[in-house]
Image (spheres, rainbow, N blue to C red):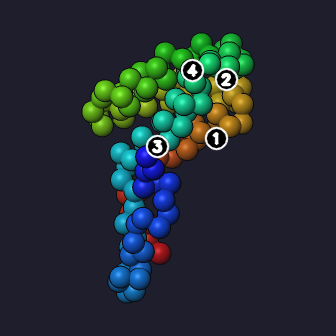
Amino acid sequence: MKSLLDEPHSTPDPLRRNPGSCILPAISTDHRIRRAATQIVNLVLAEDYAYLDALPDAVEIEIVTPLSAVGQALNEGTPHELVRAVRLFLSCALPMEGEMPSDLAAAVTELRFSLTQPSTTRL
């Protein structure tokens, strides 16, 4: 089953319907956080654990437990619980960013940005 994220044509273009508009509807903050958190959980906690096993020990030690809490909040938690888990994860992950592989560091940066990005985009 495809999601709306997979189908770029599934969302109508707001400027075509309202050419004078200068504010585009944005993805909700909850959706941005969920998307960024899911990316990290899927990357690090994949079923084969190959990525996790390849991480430097110091990074693995710092991020595994808080990332597991993020995964649990994604599956069973409220939006508030997810934000709390993400903040905990970021507090552990950010000091280790320099020791992370570049793809994980970029995903962590994306997650951090998802917490601070405004909910509307102005042209």
Q: Which mark is residue 35?
A: 3
- Camera-near label (1 vs 2) is 2
Q: Earlier in the sequence, mark 1 or mark 2?
A: 2
Q: Is residue 15 visible?
A: yes
Please give the residue where the numbered disc 2 appears in the rendered image: 51
> In which quarter of the view is residue 45 placed?
top right
Q: Nearer the viewer, residue 103 or 112?
A: 103
Q: Secondary structure at mark 1?
A: helix
Three-letter code, disc 1: Ala
Residue at 43% in and 26% down: 71
Tell me the quarter of the picture where residue 57 sits: top right
Alpha carbon distance from label 1 to label 2: 15 Å
Q: Which circle's residue, 4 or 3, is located before the other in the chain?
A: 3
Contact, mark 1 vs mark 2 (Cβ under 8 Å) = no
Label 2 sits on what residue type? Answer: Tyr
Residue 87, x across and y down, in percent: 43, 31
Residues 38 and 79: in front is 38
Q: Which mark is residue 106?
A: 1
Quarter of the rendering containing residue 33: top left
Name the residue: 43% across, 50% down. 3
> CA separation, marks 3 and 1?
14 Å
Q: Position of residue 2 (x, y in %)?
A: 45, 50
For the residue carrying disc 1, how many other residues have a C-alpha within 10 Å: few (<14), some (14-19), or many (20+)?
some
Picture layout, residue 120 above or below residue 80:
below
Q: Amino acid at mark 4?
A: Glu
Where is mark 4, residue-wise? 47
Q: Earlier in the sequence, mark 3 or mark 2?
A: 3
Q: Amino acid at mark 3?
A: Arg
Identify which residue is drawn at 35% across, 45% down: 30
